[in-house]
Amino acid sequence: MNTSSYPTWLEINLSAIEANTHYFIELTRTPLMGVIKANAYGFGSVEVGKTLLQAGAEWLAVARYAEAQTLREAGITAPILVFGLTMPEEVDAAIANDITLSMYSFEIANIYAQRTKAIGKPLKVHLKVDTGLGRLGVYADEVLSLARFALEKGKIEIDGIYSHLAMVDEGDFPETEHQTVLFSNVVQALSENGIRPRWIHLAGSSGAIYAPATRFNLVRSGCALLGIAPRNTAPIPKELRRVLSWKAHLASCKMIPMGCGVGYGHAYVTSNEEIIGVLPIGYSDGFRRLPGNEVIIDGKKVPVVGKMCMDMAMVRLPKIYPMGTEAVIIGSQGKATIDLEDLANRWKIGEVDVVSNISLRVPRVYTRD
């Protein structure tokens, strides 16, 4: 690994992803769908997808068709589910590339049926049920009608059925049990009418860990496999490893006299002679312009001072360091650690918000133990 040419970069430990995948499969004893939407939360969908499959995942899932196409072009042949909207003009390509699409309304089912008839090839779908999230999906009392409609209209194969839990990420709420029972009843009703999808999935990362009854015969996980806490109200389970580090090289370091302003608007003024370093990271990289930020240099936490710039941040240092000295934004150095949880708490957002908003201009470097 050579990071000397990068001003700032992410290090993504593929061995940690493998370990998390093994743990998840062992915990749930259920086939795993690795969720790698939004470029695997910013970690890199192709590299992460291949790692998950090598570690035992059977499925991958994305949010949009273009993301699935990227995986196919990279040589990934495993089953892929698209959660969200696939545009009508993309359906033919989805069929050709053996991508499984979500069927969440009569309108989209009709489009799928038209395209399968037009090209004479079947399309695999997973039927999406809205059990209480209020997002995509038909209600429980419409599921049987939608399934029959799709099967009668065209060459549509209902390979799976799924729903999303609304409250399990926030803690133990009765809504989770209610959604689980409702979903189970829908699956039973389909079965009694001769419609038996192979794959039945309700649990995401939090459901699979904290609500075993939601596992059915396939579980989904994205954030937990990437070392991100799946539940907003609890720290990451101790069995899961952190995957991501964010680092930068010091751009400059100099003594600034007492009473001088630092940065735009002189939001920070030196109270004595102070050593100020400049890091090549800013809010356009995903390092938020909020008070209280810190980084680690020489194994010690140092404060970010002044108003953060688009591409640079200033830090107060205890001594002069040479250009190129390594700074850690997320991760460990010496005995000091700044974890994803620390940034999420400081910025008052979820851990997944932190990582998914790190700019793509920050290079991703893949490491192993």
Image (cartoon, helix red, strand yellow):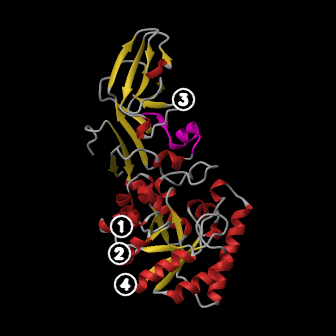
Q: Are marks 2 and 3 in contact (CB under 8 Å)?
A: no
Against 80, residue 144 (above or below) is below
Q: Which mark is residue 292?
A: 3
Q: Are marks 1 and 2 in contact (CB under 8 Å)?
A: yes
State the separation of the CA atoms marked 1 and 2: 8 Å
Query: Which tag, 1 or 3, sits closer to the chain's start?
Result: 1
Against 304, residue 22 (above or below) is below
Residue 130 shows in the view: yes
Q: Residue 107 is drawn in which quadrant?
A: bottom right
Give percent across and percent down for residue 219: 54, 69
State the separation of the CA atoms marked 3 and 4: 58 Å
Give percent across and percent down for residue 271: 50, 11
State the separation of the CA atoms marked 4 and 1: 19 Å
Rendered residue at 26%/43% (across/down): 2
Q: Which mark is residue 119?
A: 4
Tag 1: residue type? Gln
State the separation of the CA atoms marked 2 and 3: 48 Å
Residue 196 shows in the view: no
Q: Secondary structure at mark 2?
A: loop
**Mark 1, mark 3: which one is toward the viewer?**
1
State the separation of the CA atoms marked 1 and 3: 41 Å
Q: Which mark is residue 97?
A: 2
Rendered residue at 51%/56% (across/down): 224
Query: Which tag, 1 or 2, sits closer to the chain's start?
Result: 1
Give percent across and percent down for residue 309: 42, 29
Disc 1 target residue = 69
Rendered residue at 48%/84% (across/down): 157
Q: Secondary structure at mark 1?
A: helix
Query: Which tag, 3 or 4, sits closer to the chain's start?
Result: 4
Magenta residue span: 332-349
Circle 4 packing at 10 Å, graded few (<14), some (14-19), many (20+), is: few
Tag 3: residue type? Gly
